[in-house]
Image (tube, helix red, strand yellow):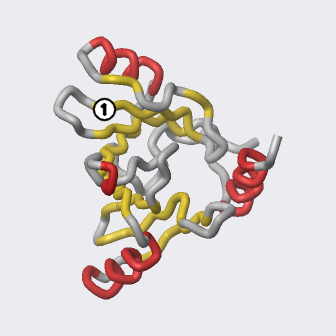
């Protein structure tokens, strides 16, 4: 029997910066050269953009993706180019607490194909936050298969 996943993935801090940018692949190459970043994971979208990637700089993870209006709000549209990704034990409770405190919901909390319970919001000061609880640990292969199913035409 496999152990249930921790609510915060192993080796990841509770708060993780999430960069939304044009040219994520070029950014990863730059961060490798400039800061000695190690590429941990890269998930391309069906059209070849980077849907999600993780790099490690020192002991910290930085997540990043190409601009996607439906997930990663483009900086070119006047949005902040950084999302603060927050891993918590109960994403639903923290999401609702943030809404009650004045945040505006972006993507409602839901189970996502990559194994997290996830939602996004914008705080009253204009900053993007994503709230997540890890529900299932998936291998990169399992995640890629789940992504194919999630993006398959219906």
Farthest residue to the left: give it.
125
The answer to which image quadrant residue 87 occupies is top left
Left or right of residue 120: residue 99: left
Farthest residue to the bottom: give it.
33
The spot of residue 5 in percent (x, y) is 58, 41
The spot of residue 142 in percent (x, y) is 73, 55
The answer to which image quadrant residue 122 occupies is top left
- Local packing at callout 1 (Cα closer than 10 Å; few below 14, some 14-19, many 20+) is some
Q: Residue at x 33, y 38 (%)?
A: 129
Q: Residue at x 38, y 53 (%)?
A: 74
Relative to 34, is 135 above or below?
above
The spot of residue 106 in percent (x, y) is 42, 30
Relative to 91, is 101 above or below?
above
Comparing 93 with 101, the one in front is 101
Farthest residue to the top: give it.
100
Q: Please state, as top left, top right, bottom left or bottom right, where the N terminus lies in the image.
A: top right
The spot of residue 118 in percent (x, y) is 51, 34
Relative to 130, is 99 above or below?
above
Comparing 113 with 104, the one in front is 104
The residue labelled by disc 1 is 122
Relative to 31, is 55 above or below?
above
Q: Residue at x 29, y 71 (%)?
A: 58
Q: Please state, as top left, top right, bottom left or bottom right, where the C terminus lies in the image.
A: top right
Q: Secondary structure at mark 1?
A: strand
Comparing 110 with 154, the one in front is 154
Left or right of residue 52: residue 136: right
């Amino acid at each position: 029997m496999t152990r249930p996943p921790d609510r915060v993935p192993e080796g990841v801090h509770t708060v993780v910066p999430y960069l939304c940018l044009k040219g994520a692949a070029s950014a990863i190459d730059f961060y490798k050269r400039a800061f000695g970043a190690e590429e941990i994971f890269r998930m391309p979208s069906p059209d070849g953009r980077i849907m999600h990637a993780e790099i490690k700089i020192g002991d910290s993870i930085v997540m990043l993706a190409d601009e996607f209006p439906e997930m990663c709000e483009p900086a070119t549209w006047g949005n902040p180019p950084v999302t603060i990704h927050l891993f918590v034990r109960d994403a639903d409770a923290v999401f609702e607490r943030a809404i009650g405190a004045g945040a505006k919901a972006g993507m409602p909390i839901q189970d996502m194909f990559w194994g997290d319970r996830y939602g996004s919001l914008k705080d009253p000061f204009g900053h993007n936050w994503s709230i997540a609880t890890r529900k299932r640990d998936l291998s990169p292969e399992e995640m890629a298969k789940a992504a194919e199913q999630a993006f398959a035409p219906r």
